[in-house]
Amino acid sequence: MQRIAVNPWDWSLALGYSQGEIVTGISRHLVCAGQTAVNATGAPQHAGDMRGQIGLTLDNLENVLAKAGMGLGNVIRLNVYATDVDAALQNFDLLGARFGPTGNAPPMTLLGVTRLAIPTLMIEIEATAAD
């Protein structure tokens, strides 16, 4: 797989994402369901704690990727849904801490929503990955 970042401006790189990306030579394409802060039995965790929820959500995303033989370096698109965008942004360093070492800054969208499927959840992350 080859990836070419498309960034007419560089301001988004400081935030950890690219404006676009050309991806060629894909052999496998993984579409992940939205991952949230739930434990292995599906029970919500870290009610009211955005930082805790982002951390567990990223753990769950990494578990899905690993089950497919992939990692965060394979992610080519992120959609993030948050019930409190300001709180999410205050804790986005967690995304940088996970994605930074991979050198991957996939295109990303952050959307504010009024609620998620389970009312105590504050963040949901969908990912598309390829190799």
Image (cartoon, rainbow, N blue to C red):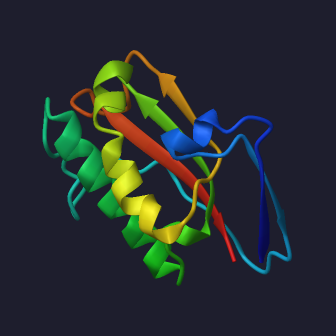
Q: Position of residue 122 (x, y in %)?
A: 29, 31
Task: Residue 33 in the image: state x and y as whole percent.
Answer: 52, 53
Which residue is painted at 45% across and 78% down in the image?
66
Q: In the drawing, does residue 89 fall left or right of residue 29?
A: left
Left or right of 20 in this view: 108:
left
The residue drawn where x is 76% and y is 43% is 7
Horizontal side, residue 29 vs residue 123: left or right: right
Q: Nearer the viewer, residue 5 or 113?
A: 5
In this rendering, the count of numbered labels is 0
Residue 107 shows up from this direction: yes
Q: Is residue 25 above or below residue 86?
A: below
For the N terminus, which image quadrant?
A: bottom right
Q: Residue at 31% of width from left, 62% of height from top?
A: 59
Please say whether residue 37 is visible from this viewpoint.
Answer: no
Quarter of the image that includes the C terminus: bottom right
| Image location (x, y in percent) of residue 50 | 22, 35
Instruction: Spot the residue most to the bottom.
Output: 69
**Placement of 27 over or under 103, stated as above or below:** below
Q: Nearer the viewer, residue 11 or 94?
A: 11
Residue at 45% over, 60% down: 99
Q: Which sits in the foreground, 57 or 76? A: 76
Q: Position of residue 105 (x, y in %)?
A: 58, 54
Q: Is residue 86 above or below residue 63?
A: above
